[in-house]
Image (cartoon, rainbow, N blue to C red):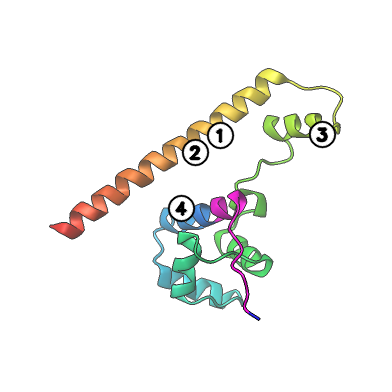
Amino acid sequence: MGRRAVEQGPVGERASTMIRQLRASRGWSLADLERRLDEAGRPILRSGLSKIESGERRVDVDDLAAFCQVFGVEPSELLGLPTSDSPFARAMRMIYGELDELDLEAAMAEVKRLHMLSTEASHVEFLLLRRLTEAQQS
């Protein structure tokens, strides 16, 4: 019996993007990341890393732990989730009945900030891809 591919959800997509961005921000090649993951005890081949970054391969829990270790980040950061003390997280806890009060202005400011970061990152990625395409064509 064959296995069905499971669609990657929005958190998986953010993880792929964050892994790519964290690697690039450190100036690491895929080979550098491959070596660091191997040293951390979670070998993933460059081809696998490329698939993770492009969203073709899902990240499992063991992968997540290794990525967090080599990048020095918390899982919530790598997954693009709000920290528990952010206004956005407080708003979500209020919506689900875990808090009695809600600072709507602070929550909206955090949501707008996150939206701006996401929009800016998408724009920068688009520009970089365009420059890369132009460089490859010349």
Residue at image location 66% in from the left, 49% down from the top: 76
User: Which of the numbered marks, if any, corresponds to residue 114?
Assistant: 1
Choose top left, top right, bottom left or bottom right for residue 7: bottom right
Q: Earlier in the sequence, mark 2 or mark 3?
A: 3
Element at badge 1? helix
Element at badge 3? loop
Classify 77 as above or below 51.
above
Residue at image location 16% in from the left, 58% down from the top: 137
Which amino acid does the dot numbered 3 rest on? Tyr
Residue 129 shows up from this direction: yes
- The one of 79 and 66 positioned closer to us in this rendering: 79
Residue 79 shows up from this direction: no
Q: Earlier in the sequence, mark 3 or mark 4?
A: 4
Distance (Cα) linking label 3 and label 4: 32 Å
Element at badge 2? helix
Magenta segment boundaries in residue numbering = 2-15
Q: Residue furthest front?
A: 1
Give coordinates of residue 138: x percent, y percent.
12, 57
